[in-house]
Amino acid sequence: MAKVENALRLTAVDRKAAMLGLEPGMPLANARAMLPALKVVTADEPADLKLLARIADWCDRFTPFVACEPPDMLLLDVTGAAHLFGGEKPMLDQIREKLSKQGFALRAAIAVTAAAARALAHYKDGTIVPPGAEAAAIAPLPVEALNLDAITTHAFRRAGLKTVGQVSARDRNELTARFGARMVFALDHALGKAEKPISPRIALPDYMAEHRFAEPIVTEDVIRATLHSLAATLSSVLEQRGEGARRLEASFFRADGTVYRIAIETSSALRAPDIIERLFREKLDALADPLDPGFGYDLIRLGAVRAERCVAEVIGFDADANEEKEIRFLIDCLAARFGANRILAFQPNDTHIPEAAFVAMPAQYAQNAKWERDAKEAPRRPLRLFARPEPVQAVAAVPEGPPLRFRWRRALHDVVLAEGPERIAMEWWRHQSPQPSRDYFRVEDSQGKRFWLYREGIYERETLAPRWFMHGVFA
């Protein structure tokens, strides 16, 4: 039961309650008046949605195009998949039989449009409608089969239109003027005269290959061999299209209905079966909760979730052709084992703020960046840059210049050489409050140590004690 429109109502009933005259939507008070010993349980919508998602995962073995319609409906697009199970009727019988063994009561039907299949599943369970016969199949059904709002359905009843056939016989202009174009489209959709695509709960892969087993398999060697075979099949398809996979997902369908999905990502477009199988092996070995085959897997599917165009690489005669590939393969292996967000690479950032001049990002998505400078020029930035500038005490300072002597980390340094200032204005559009500018100096002390100091704010004669910070040290 659940509270609907400020009243407690039944949301679902079991078979025995239905035989005694109870039905979903009935007020709880009326149900208790009919059956004083009625046992009711509060509806748990999140748990129901989770269960529906589990059933949808199980249905993926018949077609990857599965859509959920809460609270209790699934739509499967079986176009081009029925022949794998011997036809539409054997496939429908197999779905009904296996779900019934799992303890579920269901109604099912097959039609060209989703609206027609929904209507027939509710009122003519087990119907399989050939293409073009939808109008005749749903004509005798009540208007409730159109799944319209309660006001429209009541209006049809008051007008004497009690079946779908009676509604469809009326003039379309009359129906549009009275009920709107949306209702007319819903009617045409149910009659097979209009098409409305369904949205799958899981995005379909760009390319897919699968292997069904006559008997469930449990051995690791067979699983790896199957992944390699599926990778080879995908590789041939990708090669014909001139593409490679950047993200691959392997789905393992267990005989008891449990589905495991394992995904890997690559740093470049990939289609080599040996490398794909190796990356999945790394991923499977690194799982904190290893895959439990249970009674075995009866289906393994491999899909290229994201594919990209393979760009031909031009390699010079003096270049090592395998060096970059080995580095990319190492990155992919480490990412598969430890996670992509733990294998990072530094990338230059388009900003003049020193601490933001680079950014760490997953190495699989990093571009080949070259950090170059003129060998004859002294480095303008220190090799070691502090994450947070450290305060410096200026013991002796001169106007508009660096301190002649400063104390940093309890050590006193005498400046003998200095270069600067290099003024850097902060990015005002990134901060709500104004940030002071910085005047940077490269200084060297009497012991030959070189530092990178900056003064906070623009120098003013009235400023008696400007603030100094150490931002980095040179090698």
Image (cartoon, grey):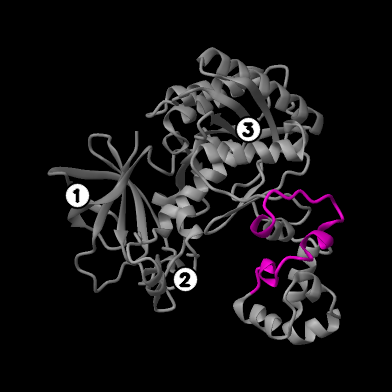
* Residue underneath mark 1: 405
Residue type, numbered disc 1:
Arg
Q: CA distance from mark 1 to mark 2?
A: 87 Å
* Residue underneath mark 3: 268
| Residue at point 70%, 72% (across, down) | 143
* Residue underneath mark 2: 26
Tell me the magenta residue range.
121-148
Quarter of the figure with the N terminus: bottom left
| Residue at point 32%, 66% (across, down) | 457
Of the two numbered discs 3 and 2 in the rendering, the one whose residue sits closer to the viewer: 2
Residue 173 coordinates in the image, percent (x, y)? 85, 83
Residue type, numbered disc 3:
Ser
Residue type, numbered disc 2:
Met
Q: Nearer the viewer, residue 20 or 108?
A: 20
Q: CA distance from mark 3 to mark 2?
A: 58 Å
Residue 131 highlighted magenta (yes or no): yes
Q: CA distance from mark 3 to mark 1?
A: 53 Å
Mark 3 vs 2: CB contact within 8 A: no
| Residue at point 72%, 32% (across, down) | 85
Quarter holding residue 142: bottom right
